[in-house]
Image: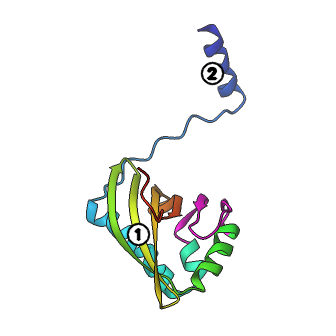
Amino acid sequence: MALVALVLLSAIAFGGVAPAQAEPCAPISEAQATALFERWNNALQTGDPDQVVALYSPDALLLPTLSAEPRQSPEAIRAYFEQFLSHSPKGRIDGRVLQLGCNEVVDAGTYSFWLDGDHWVAARYTFVYAFQEGGWRIVHHHSSLQPTTQAA
């Protein structure tokens, strides 16, 4: 107890900063959470990687569908989408589960992409969105190709 008091007094004496107040919970409905994917999919339709990257938090982690390399910076995420957008992707949700929380949304399920105007690619996905600086940003996005066979 004395140690805790000493640490607190030292912080005050040497200009320590009090812990930041937690942001109040941003309300979000299922319809609004569903619209977050549509916003991302619409950004894909522009063909502009900068519009897609703008939806991600600066410290987001992308585990992309068509690359084995984790992307952990806006530059790395942009490099992935430069390549991915060259396939003119158009996404659709095939099945999803939404989990709404305080300043966080988890959207997970299966989706498919129409690529190169001639074939569908099925994948599993997880988007984790966080309410940051007044808006919903992607903080984690994992996408992996759908297995072609069912395990017994």
Is residue 69 found inside the magenta-colored segment of the image? yes
Residue 114 horizontal/vertical position (percent): 45, 83
The amino acid marked with disc number 1 is Tyr
The reply to whether the magenta stretch includes residue 83 is: no
Q: Secondary structure at mark 1?
A: strand
Q: Tell me how far mark 1 sits from mark 2, CA to CA.
A: 50 Å
Q: Position of residue 112 (x, y in %)?
A: 42, 74
Left/right of residue 89 with respect to residue 111 in the rendered view: right
Of mark 1 and mark 2, the one earlier in the sequence is 2
The answer to whether residue 100 is above or below residue 92 is: above
Residue at numbered disc 1: 111
Residue at position x 69%, y 33% in the image: 15
Q: Is 39 left or right of 71, judged from the image as shown? A: left
Residue that label 2 marks: 8
Q: From the viewer's side, name the closer residue of 16 and 4.
A: 4
Residue 74 versus residue 15: which sits nearer the camera? 74
Residue at point 38%, 60% (across, down): 109
Q: Quadrant of the N terminus?
A: top right
What's the residue type where badge 2 is placed?
A: Leu
Residue range of the region highlighted in magenta in the rendering: 54-74
**Label 2 Cα neighbours within 10 Å, binned few <14 / some 14-19 / many ≥20:** some
Write down the quadrant of residue 10 in the picture: top right
Tag of residue 152: none
